[in-house]
Amino acid sequence: MRQRLRDLVERATPSGGTGERAIKSSVWLVTQNLLDRGLQLVTLVVIGRIVGPEAIGLVGIALLALAAMDEFTSIGLRDALVQREADDVDEFLSTTWLLETTRGLGIALVVFLAAPLVATVFAEPRATDIVRVIGLSPLALGLKNPGVIYFQKNLDYHKQFVYQTSGSIVQFVVAVSYVLLVPTVWSYVVGYVAGNVARLVVSYAIHGFRPSLQFDREAAKDMIGYGKWITGSSIVYFIYSQGDDAFVGWLLGPAALALYQYAYRFSNAPATEFTQVVGKVMFPTYSKFQNDLPRVRSAFMRSFRFSGLLSVPMAFGIVVVAPSFVRTFLGPTWVEMIPAMQVLAVYGMLRALGRNFGPLWKALGRPDLTTKIGVLRIVLVGLLVYPVTERFGITGIALLITALYVFPIFPIDIYLIGSMLDTRMTDIYAELLYPLVAGALMAGATWWVRETIAASPPVEFVGVVLTGVVTYPLAVLLVEELSNWGIRQDITMFLDGVRS
């Protein structure tokens, strides 16, 4: 038995050519994301049901403050090292460690000092101490072993799996144990910090590189020069991805913030967590053959096809299952989030598809595109967010950001991708038609089951989920038989790569 397990691990270890390594890395990343996000969502369900939306909103305020500092000070060091064609980047790692450690210490100090101001902005003095404690996490992350960059650069995602999930498991155990013993929102805070400390320890246990105090000014200048657009895109990303959260918390209060954040996380996580694997694997993959356009184009179309296959049914399924899910797992105090959750499921599908664009732009030397498109999104949302939110609450802001992504943002993304890859926009859009048809068939079946069984929320939830699991593969097979989708060939190739 032990030998069989050892053989399985050896076969699953990323090896061979770039394509085979990418496929095996995808398996590890999918497994990591399932475990990581699954533990996070279970933690949110347990704590949310026990302490309620208003208390959860206090943590939401703290996480917003921390995210703002993190994104506004991001200098793109990791992306700069992954993008380099050279396999060995040891000469840059000590400099990277010093920069990240200094950055982490600076964030921790600023967050600690600014905590009362943050609490005042949101009119919630109870958030002050929570902000300060959560603000310790960047220091732990800054001190981590910079050698972990090789896990992504070399597609060694079996090691990344150990590094990432160790923190997730510690966070889950600490947070859930705490809230069951002492029903307070501090359970999430303590678990969050404990998880990041665990990753710090594991980073040195799993990789042999040891940083020194040697600082290379030229190396720093080189990395920061590449990362300047990463910095810009990080700032812009925070504003358009969490600016709506901050606005809801400021205008409507912590309880509304918790409802909106939960609606966002539970509607977006299934689709985006699967497809962010594509982005993480494809960035180093594109970077390795960035000068071979036909190969890049073929890889992009295949990854975009897979993203549609995965994200569309999840989004459609969430729209149908949201009412029974919320009533079953979160309880009556959370039902107000259901309409927003259904709208944001569509947004999650579009975000999942959009995760294919950034890695390509970065690999081909155009990280500025993410920043520029993000600025456009911010301007459009900023013009309408106040009247829409004031009148329609969290459902209104969910409709706003989803509608603006449908048009004009998503068409602009497709246009730019088509131009860079020298392919027609219609060819890219065509890849979405097939999963949309299959997803619509699945949604119709699940909706019919939900309306027919008229059972309690838990039974309804199980019945709808099982229906979706059964009908979507059948719908995919039907669409494949009636069209030239070609997804069967891609799935076969993927499975062959895993088996190899």
Image (tube, grey):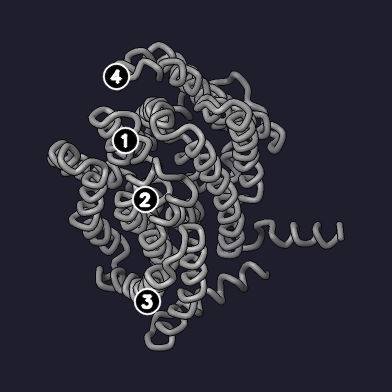
Residue bearing mark 3? 441
Query: Which of the two discs, 2 and 1, labels the residue nearer the N terminus?
Result: 1
**SS of the residue under disc 2:** helix
Q: Is residue 90 above or below residue 269?
A: above
Looking at the rendered structure, the kind of residue marked 3 is: Leu
Query: Which of the two discs, 3 and 2, labels the residue nearer the N terminus?
Result: 2
Q: Nearer the viewer, mark 3 or mark 1?
A: 1
Q: Distance from label 2 to label 4 (Cα)?
A: 36 Å
Q: Distance from label 4 to label 3 (Cα)?
A: 47 Å
Toward the viewer: 62 or 223? 62
Can residue 95 be seen?
A: no
Instruction: Give residue 9's position: percent from left, percent from top.
Output: 74, 57
Residue bearing mark 2? 358
**SS of the residue under disc 3:** helix
**SS of the residue under disc 4:** loop
* Quadrant of residue 25 within the rendered picture: bottom right
Query: Which of the two discs, 4 and 3, labels the residue nearer the N terminus?
Result: 4
In screen coordinates, is 418 left or right of 205? left
Residue bearing mark 4? 123
Q: Distance from label 4 to label 1 (Cα)?
A: 14 Å
Looking at the rendered structure, the kind of residue marked 2 is: Gly
| Marks 3 and 2 in Cβ contact (< 8 Å) | no
Residue at 30% x, 16% y: name it.
120
Q: Distance from label 2 to label 1 (Cα)?
A: 31 Å
Q: For label 4, count other residues whose C-alpha is less than 10 Å away and answer few (under 14), some (14-19) or many (20+).
A: some
Looking at the rendered structure, the kind of residue marked 1 is: Ala
Q: Distance from label 3 to label 1 (Cα)?
A: 34 Å
Residue bearing mark 1? 256
* Quadrant of residue 223 within the rendered picture: top left
**SS of the residue under disc 1:** helix
Q: For label 3, count other residues whose C-alpha is less than 10 Å away and answer few (under 14), some (14-19) or many (20+).
A: some
